[in-house]
Amino acid sequence: MIKRIYSELLRRKLTAFPVIAVLGSRQAGKTTLVKEELAGWKYFDLQRPSDRAPFEADPEARLEQLGLNFILDEAQSMPELFPIIRGFIDRKRSCKGQMVLLGSASFELVKNISESLAGRIGFIELPPFQWVELNQYSKDCTINELWCKGGYPEPFLMKDTNNVSDWFDAYTRTFIERDLSSLGIDFDFHHMRKFMTMLAHINAEQWNASKIGSALGINYQTVNRYLYILEKSFLVRRIPAYHANLGKRLIKAEKIYYRDTGLLHYFLGIKNETDLSVSPERGSSWESFCVEQIINSFTYRSSNTRFYHMRTAGGAEVDLIADTGKERYLFEIKLHSSPEKDMCRGLKSCMNDLKVRRGFIVYPGKDTYSLGDDVSTLPIADLLEKVDYPMVPSDKVAENRCAQKRIIRT
């Protein structure tokens, strides 16, 4: 069993909040993580009729009957439950770690939480497998394997690439035909699938809703709504353009990425590493993989980090800016065995504009070396391993562990 680094984060947050919401895309491992870490807790799936019925009949009585330490899966399917949960929590407001909510559609879940449970709940966004988790599990795993298969646990562990493709086909059908319909979202099945395919072919590019709408034969408002659905289902990520008064014109369009390269490769028809090695989309796919892994590593440490891309009208650009509030890190992502100095001109220009002292070329190699002008190469594996764990002050570690033990025992 692959140990998720988010186990520690879950236990820490249970010592700080009455309720924890674990969010993430379907099949990312939310239920497995919580069941393993909270093995003694009661578990209920609100999409299972037998589990749902008592909450529908008399939710207040059901919550009182359960008491503390229970898990509600697919919480977004019962939005009417949240105001009642608020009253239940407030009776024992000082008691931390009362319940855990799991959800895979943040546009419903977060909206209702914001209205009903503000100040009472902590969030964990669980992505599919991250490199640091697989590297700890087995030294036989490679970056290329994770990049090609993606991080969803079930297909990643499959040996037969045909089974991987079949899994993503079933996953996509279930998401479009069942999950979105069950949430009451109005959309066209065929348009959504075509949209997801087209999105794979413009992955890592600047967003232009009108251009995509014209190609699909639908208006740009519908295209933007489809993108919003995929974003809030944790399947795609928007990276906004950096805005600053720099005395030069900046491109304002955001960039769009598939968050899991396994799903991206399914829509691109890439089935294995051989297909990937000759695909014209391999550069944008590598950028997508690195951007998602880097963002997840930073946000694991601090949810306050903000991410941007930057491109000037003159063509200078940087793929990812991580702004922690104290420092800004500039990353240009290259699929190259040994990046050279002429590859960092755009990055250096952006560093000068933003007055950032150091910049990095992230690449798939193993060596770190200077390219001059305060720009260095940085192997993706080294970067991910440097930012994987949060900075918890040493005097707090023992205190947190004691509190976690009290929660688990109850």
Image: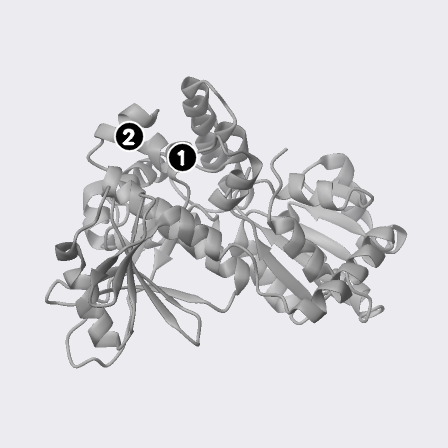
* Image label count: 2
Give the mark toward the camera: 2 or 1: 2
Circle 1 sits on which residue?
A: 262
At 26% across and 75% down in the image, what residue appears?
354
Quadrant (top left/top right/bottom left/bottom right) for the N terminus:
top right
Circle 2 sits on which residue?
A: 276
At 43% across and 45% down in the image, what residue appears?
235
Quadrant (top left/top right/bottom left/bottom right) for the C terminus:
bottom right
Q: Is residue 323 above or below residue 66?
A: below
CA separation in Å, label 2 and label 1:
11 Å
Dot 1 alpha-carbon crowd within 10 angstroms: few under 14, some 14 to 19, many 20 or more: many
- Residue type pointed to by label 2: Leu
Q: Nearer the viewer, residue 261 or 64?
A: 261
Residue 37 can be seen in this image: yes
- The image shows residue 187 at horizontal and vertical percentages of 40, 43
- The image shows residue 364 at horizontal and vertical percentages of 32, 43
Horizontal relation, residue 232 to residue 309: left or right: right
Residue 258 can be seen in this image: no
